[in-house]
Amino acid sequence: MICNTFPVSLLNWIDCASTSNISGKQYLESAVDLALMIIRRIIQNQAHEDEILADNVIVHVSDSSTACSNSQILSVDIEIKNDVPTGLVDHRKACHALGKLFLLLFSKRKSQSSWILEGAHFQRPEIGKIALGGNSTNDIKLLGIEEGESLSLTEKRINRSNEVSTRKSTKRTVSASSFLRDLGLPVSVCRLVSDLLEADNDELRSDMAFSFLEEVEAEMLQLSEHKNQFLYDRTCPTRALEDTTLFQIGGDDALFGRELELDTLLNALDRVASESNNTQQHNIYSGITKLPREAVFISGHSGSGKSSLMKKVTHRCRESDWFVVDCKFDEQMDPLMTILNGIDASIEGFFEKSWPHTLSAGKVMSESILTSIDREGINQLCILVPNLSRFFPDVANPKDLVGQSFGNGVIGAGRNRLDYLFHVLIKSICLGSKLVLSLDDLQWADTLTVTIVLNFMSTIDQTLISPNISFLGGKGGLLLLGSYRENEVEDDGCLMNHIRMLSQSLSVSFISTAGLSKSQINDMLSAKLYIPKRLTSSLADVVHKKTCGNPMFVKEFLKSIITNRMLQFSVKSRRWVWDEDTLDLISITDGVAELLSVKLRI
């Protein structure tokens, strides 16, 4: 379908949208998208400051009959004047001109009619009249946030301005940021316009004033892509703190600075799933089934985010039709029992879900076990994995298993028998469903556990399963995820030797989790504090300096400075505030370092 385009001037677009019935939210979001198009066109055309005028901006919309209000903005053009000198663009002057243009756009031209521009400030020649017009509440609703507390704060500010203005007759000046804030616009937009206007004013220029058009484009892109985070101010400190998720336990937070690592993990997951769905390689006469399988090992220091990466993958698997076994080793529990307990908990999940694919997978798994080992072997498996007895009510009665043991002990004896039973169990699970086996903190696993698990990955195709199972050659697969602290594992030790041997028989990927860079920390701070990256960069510098980029250190450091009110939410400013100089005086080598050390030992 061909869409007709209709060109309108920027001023006409503003007037049409301002007088239409669209909400303040719709206008603000459309204005942000339009501002992004304008800055991109300015950069593309290499427009000079004399060309960056509202009269030169043409907006192409999809339908002229709707007075621009409901029309889709398709593109923007900047008319180039022949009498404008050519040459290099003065970015500071261009930013200043862009600030005046954005001021008209976001204020709906109110600044043009009632205020005189003087650098980054406005001077009001006659104070007796308020610039917003007859109904300030309606004007605020058109230009700002419409909900509850934000609106009430804005109304109070406007009412105070009215009271003061009627009592004074002298001139006064107000910053562009304050002017826009009084109109109900979010802090992010107010600060952006103000810093643009200060770009070419040496007397009023702040450290955060823009110097390059590309900086403006980057910030406008962030506002446009994350409107809910940056266009609607937080006015409640408690809500602002909750939004950071720093003090939440078990939250499904986004991983910052781990995009490439997560892609590596998800690509391995997708390869196993794809091959599992397509493969039909099996020998029905020998009962050997070739299962698609891969392994990914994540290394790094304590607190570097290894566990978070693995949780991201297992969370995605649980939302689909994967069988997930989560195991986290420690210094207290026997490593092999940790795996068996993980399998037991996952099998219990079969009975908590009544999804068709889980019922089918459970049937295939139990059928495979039943036809591959004898009654004694099933009883022994049920000793190791108690919930497995629920699949064999006629074969293994839980009451009959009380007091029984596995050889001379549940874990210690019958190495070959244990190996075989483990192989049958895992392969039977894989026949009924794709399996992800997540082994966290492998540095705590003993030689027996490492040998059984990694040997199984190499020799799974040699484990005989009865050929009388209809599922043979079906939709199984196996992904092994392992993590270990690289500074606590010897290169010539058992774990690394087995990993090297494993890489000779199947695809093995390696991920190293280094510390976060300043840029990655800044991305995180911007997202959690809902402040554009340009304004959080100074805080990111301090945080990186104090934590060396360790993700756990970063989180604990931020929690510490919030608790001590060195980073706090200001209702007056409607954003998080801090003092870099104060933060820089904090000694990370004392209290905070000890706190982190304790957490890492837990």
Image (spheres, rainbow, N blue to C red):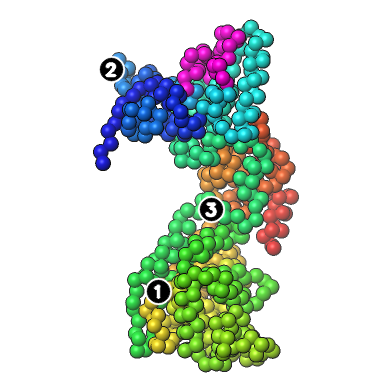
Image quarter hosting the N terminus: top left
Indicate which disc, 2 or 3, sits on the residue closer to the N terminus: 2
> Going by the image, does 377 lie left or right of 160?
left
Residue density around tag 1, few if under 14, some if 14–19, many if 20 or more, within 10 Å: many
Indicate which disc, 1 or 2, sits on the residue closer to the N terminus: 2
What is the magenta range?
Answer: 108-136
Asked whether 133 falls inside the magenta stretch, the response is yes
The residue drawn where x is 67% and y is 74% is 333
Q: Quadrant of residue 152?
A: top right
The residue drawn where x is 49% and y is 69% is 355
Of helix, strand and loop, which one carries label 2? Answer: loop
Check if mark 1's residue and mark 2's residue have beta carbons within 8 Å: no
Q: Is residue 148 above or below residue 442?
A: above
The answer to whether residue 42 is seen in the rendering is no
Spot the residue most to the left: 2
Q: Is residue 257 above or below residue 190?
A: below
Q: Is residue 311 above or below residue 188?
A: below
Residue 568 percent across, percent down from the top left: 68, 38
Q: CA distance from mark 1 to mark 3?
A: 31 Å
Residue 525 percent across, percent down from the top left: 57, 43
Type of residue at label 2? Asn
Type of residue at label 3? Leu
Image quarter hosting the C terminus: bottom right
Instruction: In this rendered view, identify the residue nearer to me: 383 or 92.
Output: 383
- Which residue is label 1 attached to? 475
